[in-house]
Each structure stands twice: as C-alpha cells, then as structure tokens.
Image (spheres, rainbow, N blue to C red):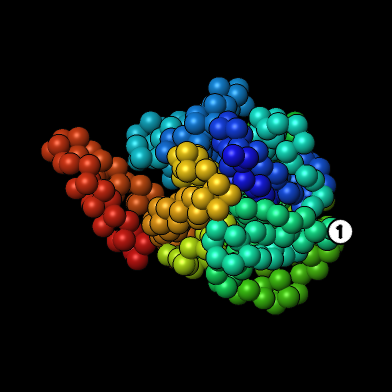
Amino acid sequence: MNSPKVAVIGAGPAGLTLARLLQCHDIPCTVFEYEKTIDARDQGGTLDLHENGGLLALKEAGIYEVFLKHARPEGEVLKIYLPDDQLIMDEGKNADQARPKEMHGRPEIDRIKLRTMLLESLKPGTVQWGHKLRKVESSGEGPSERTFALHFQHRVEAGFDLVVGGDGAWSRVRPLCTSEKPFYSGIAGYDVRILDADNTQPALAERCGHGMCLTLGPNRGILSQKNGDGTIRTYGFMRAAETWEEDSGIDFKDPDTALADFIDQFYSDWAQDAKDLILKADRGTAVPRKMYMLPVGLRWESQPGVTVIGDAAHVMTPFAGVGVNVAMQDSLELSRQIISRKDQWTSKAEQRLSLAAGIAAYEAEMFDRAERYAKKTIMYLDLFFHHRGGVAMVEHFDRVKAIEKAQCEDGATKEALQERVRTAQEVGSTG
Ligand SMILES: Cc1cc2nc3c(=O)[nH]c(=O)nc-3n(C[C@H](O)[C@H](O)[C@H](O)COP(=O)(O)OP(=O)(O)OC[C@H]3O[C@@H](n4cnc5c(N)ncnc54)[C@H](O)[C@@H]3O)c2cc1C
C-alpha cells in the first residue's frame, strides 16, 4: 500500500518537527512554506525547550545530539529589576534566588538555529518555499473518500489525503476545523534589537547578562533577552488598547523619533539603563507588536483528513515561554497517532479512516494539554504586567519554592504538590 499524500503547511517549529518525525517512519510529506528562503525575515529571539515538550520531540526525532551542539544552557538565567533600577532577583549570581525547580533544565536555543537544524534533518526538497496557502478545499463523500486541494497564490495542488496546518496564528487551514479566530490579548508594545551588544553596548550587555533581564513596573515592562549571536532583543510591552499605535500619535515609520517618543510617553520615569535597552536599539530593527491569542480551552469536532498543530491550534501570548514546546509536542503526539496505525493501511479507504482516527485521538489529547498551558500563560501574563510590578513575580516564585521545599520535607505526593502549586498560582494571579 502506498503512503498517504501528506501536506504540512508552514515550516515553523511545529511543521518541521512533524515532517521529520513522519520521515523517520518512512512516511513522505511535503512542507509548503510562505517565506521564500530560510532567512527571508528575522526569525525572532531565543526559545527554551522543556523536557516533556521540545526536548522530547527532538529525542524521538533522533536529533537531540544536534540540538546539544547549538543549545545555550548559560542562557537559562533570569534577572528582575524594578523601574528605579533596584535588582530584586539575580539567579545567575545568587543560588538562593533561583526559580522553582519545575522551571530548571530548559536550555535555550536561538530560533534560527532550531529552524536550521530541523530543516537540515529533512530529505532534500521536502520544503517548498514561496508557497503562500490561500485556502484549502475538500472533496469526496465521507471520511474514506475525502481529499484536499491546496490553493496557493500561483497554483493549485490537489489529491492530498492529509493536510496539517502548522501555519501559525493566522492559519489558513484552521477554518476547516473551527471558525474561531485569534483575539487581542491586551498586551502590545515595541520589539527592538541591539546588534552585537557585547561590542557596541558593553554596559547594557553586562546588565542583561546571558539570559533574560526583566524590568517590571506597574502594568508594563522592558523585557530583554540575550541571543546566541550577541544581540539583545528587547520588548517594551504593556497593557494597552488594541488601537495604541494610532492613539499614541507616535510616527512608527520614523524609528529615529519613534524610539524616543515611545520612551517619553510610556517609560519616562524609569531608570536610564532600562530605557537605554530601547533607546540604543539599532534603528532598522524596531517593530511595534500586538499580542493575539485563541480562546483558552478551544475545542472543535474532529474533521477527517485535516487538523492543525502549534500556534495554528492554540496561539497564546509568550509569557509562560511554552508556545514552541506545546507546538513540538503536538507534532510528536500527532506523528505517534499516525504511525501507530500504519498497519491498518490495507486500502486507500482504510488508510484515510485510520488517519481520521489518528487525528481524533491527537486532538483529544491536545485540547486538554493546550488548555492547561493556556491557563498557565494567562497566569504569567498577569505576573508580567501586574499592578505591583516585579515584586509580584518574585513573590510568586517564592511561594512555589516554599511548596517544593515542603514537598521534600513532608513527602507530599506529586499530585498533592501539583494541587498546592495550582492553588498558589491562582492566588498569585489575583494577588
Ligand atoms: C514575541 C514572541 C516571543 C516568543 N517567545 C517564546 C519563548 O520564549 N518560548 C516559547 O516557547 N515560545 C515563544 N513564543 C511562541 C512561539 O514563537 C510559537 O509558539 C512557535 O513559534 C509556534 O510554532 P509554529 O510552528 O506553530 O508557528 P510559527 O512559528 O508561527 O510558524 C508558522 C510558519 O508557517 C508559515 N506560514 C504562515 N502562514 C502561511 C501560509 N498561508 N502559507 C504557508 N506558510 C505559512 C510562516 O511563515 C511560518 O514559517 C514567542 C512568540 C512571540 C510572538
């Protein structure tokens, strides 16, 4: 029996991980990607991969050793400042200020490195660059006959048995599963970079350290992270109306004035070093951003032959740092569900029915898992943009650490510990 004809839309972490996992089990697939080349746009900052998320997927995909060559465990450190420059947490220097144990063991990798290593793991020609999907059309009566045609900007390719949307927040595949669309999360701001910071801005590089450096004030923050290539990427993010760019009157087309106007308007009384992380940014790198999310707990009735993974299924804001991990775990779970049914591929009809069953099983697991992480993300959003600023985040870490310590001392079960952490988190998010 021939393999099914499989299309994966989007060469992001989710799509590429799925393609690799399928190819490891001799299931061919084509990845259609909108961008024209791997470096067509800035690929963003660093990502931390978690044991039961991205790292697990890479292990199963047989490329964990490659990851280790590019990983930056030294990036796993966090500093928190208040707007008056008081340093209230520095886990690189003070072991007793380390984050809770549940957050340890999450090595960082630059996003471009992750994408490159996933691409290099695929068979040549797997990714079709410059293919912007416009819509997916299905035809055929019932699940055993259903096939799909992909409409790109310049051509149509038909006859797919399985279409997986790994095409991010604004997915063109998702409408076949649900009519829900991302909505504005209430958080927006300016995304800027200082290139080669160790040489161009050594004092700011020192302030930032090797990992993440947050300056957190009431309802807003200056969130910086060091990337492997020496760049400091900073988000000046805050609680704001969706129309904040127009409301501000700032001319974002002119970064020379926009950076200073942005600081004047939103961070005027903050310490100079924090402001400089934005003011000293390379002009061409500044981009205003708004953060969007899908509803927490989104579910849909499973559709034969088509599903979505990663941000296309459950885009969340980045504040729990879990998006890429949930995405890569989706790829892992979906690939397992497809691969474990390969022995049912005795005819084309049976093959399509087995794919439909695999999709349903994947989605049932994914919906619950994504909901858990989406709730966690909301909790962290509230801590990043708390009315008491960075103090609330440090208090939250202290609460979770106290619970972890109690568990060591009183031998509470893992379930009891998790319940206590959940309760502490709920208190933290409303505190
Ligand atoms: C500012 C910011 C910071 C973040 N920081 C973190 C972090 O620290 N840790 C973390 O875990 N997560 C973080 N995230 C979230 C993380 O980036 C995403 O969860 C992750 O990239 C999802 O991967 P994906 O493959 O599902 O989607 P994406 O990475 O969005 O990839 C989708 C791919 O599909 C392509 N595509 C889109 N539309 C089409 C189309 N119509 N046709 C063909 N191709 C298309 C895109 O070009 C892209 O290559 C952050 C997100 C943002 C915005």
Instruction: Name the residue nearer the viewer: 264 or 19.
Output: 19
Q: Secondary structure at mark 1?
A: loop
Left or right: 27 in relation to 402:
right
- At horizontal 73% and vertical 49% (from top left) the residue drawn is 32
Give the percent coordinates (x, y) of residue 133. Answer: 75, 59
Quarter of the picture holding the N terminus:
top right
Which residue in the rendered view is the most extreme toward the front?
Answer: 347
Left or right: 410 in relation to 164:
left
Give the percent coordinates (x, y) of residue 222. Answer: 59, 53
- At horizontal 36% and vertical 40% (from top left) the residue drawn is 102
Examine the image and state in which quarter residue 249 appears: bottom right
- At horizontal 70% and vertical 77% (from top left) the residue drawn is 247
In the rendered view, would you say 132 is above or below 213? below
Circle 1: residue type: His
Left or right: 312 in relation to 338:
right
Q: Which residue is disc 1 drawn over?
A: 154
